[in-house]
Image: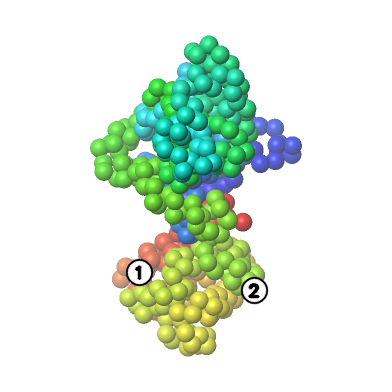
Amino acid sequence: MLLWAGSCRNPKTAPAPVVTPVADLPDIQARGTLRALIAYSATSYFLYRGQTMGYEYEMLKRLANDLGLELELQVADNLDQMLDILEKGEVDLVAHGMAVTRERQKHVAFTDYLYLTKQMLVQRKPRNWRNLNLDQIRGQLVQDPVELIGDTVSVRKNSSYLERLDNLSREIGGAIHIDTLGGHYSTDEIIKMVVDRKIKYTVADRNLARINASHYPILDVSVPVSFSQRIAWAVPRDAPHFLAAINNWIAREKKQNDYYVIYNKYFKNRRSFSRRVKSPFYSLNEGRISPFDEAIKAEARELGWDWRLLASVIYQESRFDPEATSWTGAQGLMQLMPATAAELGVEDRTDAEQSLDGGTRYLRQLYNRFNGVQDSLQRIKFALAAYNCGYEHVEDARNLAQEEGLDRNAWDRNVDSMLLALKSPENYQREVVRYGYVRGEEPYRYVQQIFERYEHYASLAR
């Protein structure tokens, strides 16, 4: 999986937009990648305790797997510009919960709906609400949208909420003043602005409103301002085969239990949501990945690596659990084997500081052994593979690559494929192979997964 930042980060210095041809399914399949635009929010895409999570993220992974494609994620800087990016051909799909509206259908095509919802007014209960009975609380709240006449509601400029408020003003025969907010605010952030008394009212889809209200009990989200609406993803209008493939996938997904489990995980599991929002290891809070971030940063500086890459290695090894023990006898944050720990002078492998220091020194040793590899990125991949399966097996794969006419100093599509080949007798019994059989799928996936996770960490943690 690949991931890159939004295209609107520096509008003053960005080059003139280039409209690329719309890709339909055959083009996407020929490319081999599904380019999806996603929002960074409390339900769509985020990090929690080092793990990449989110409703759209999980569903996108399932879609890409179903289509046999690699997933490339682009994180939107501005939610109001998501459909513009799609129309320019920069992505194949906008994976964001969007209400299907006539105005939007003039520009893009929508998939079959993922779920139905209503738009709800988000308002704050009175300060002393805990000392009031239900009738007293209701007496101080808006109970009917008509009561919003002359009042102000804050929503994003190009959201379906603004469109709905415009229509509502006409329906109730009185003006609702609309305070337009920037597209860089997620709905969750705008809801928090109501909690913090920065704005008086906003509007949100019912599932988002309810899950947020479960964590912020001062919120009232009981007043609907719309009928049921279809929430779907968007694709280009000129991609009928791609749209049909997604709709077929959605139809199959809706017959699976996992489809509803994933939805409930992010929109109905109130305890999980509250625990996440309170955690310092939740990327929308402090941007921390683990309890060991400062130590990881210090070790990464010594190693000369991005600290988020080293953090990805540690998550892969132990999920940041200093007590983690594998069936092979490896232990600690860096999963050091007893003999390796002894060579490194690590006395207590379950001590986070000792394990991190020893594991990082071992990575440095391995990195230095591949001094013939000039490309630093490829060299890091060699070091990681050696950390997983042993330096000698990686050297065998390099020797085999050279014999096969491949580049022994390139990991990607060269030595990695030879490491996979070392599971077969016709390869591990060859003269250039000194250390025999290795289950190459494990180091191959190890390197791949660490870099996939690193791309997420680099986007979501600073």
Other residues around mark 1 within 10 Å, as few (<14) / some (14–19) / many (≥20):
some
Q: CA distance from mark 2 to mark 1?
A: 31 Å
Q: Residue at x 59, y 23 (%)?
A: 151
Q: Residue at x 57, y 66 (%)?
A: 293
Q: Residue at x 42, y 44 (%)?
A: 214
In percent of width and height, residue 416 lies at 45, 63
Label 2 or label 1, whichever comes before in sequence order: 2
CB within 8 Å, label 2 to label 1: no
Residue 439 circle label: 1
In percent of width and height, residue 57 lies at 44, 45
What element does badge 1 sit on?
A: loop
Other residues around mark 2 within 10 Å, as few (<14) / some (14–19) / many (≥20):
few
Q: From what the image shows, is residue 244 above or below residue 28?
A: above
Q: Amino acid at mark 2?
A: Glu
Q: Which residue is mark 2?
A: 302
Residue placed most toward the observer, 454 or 331: 331
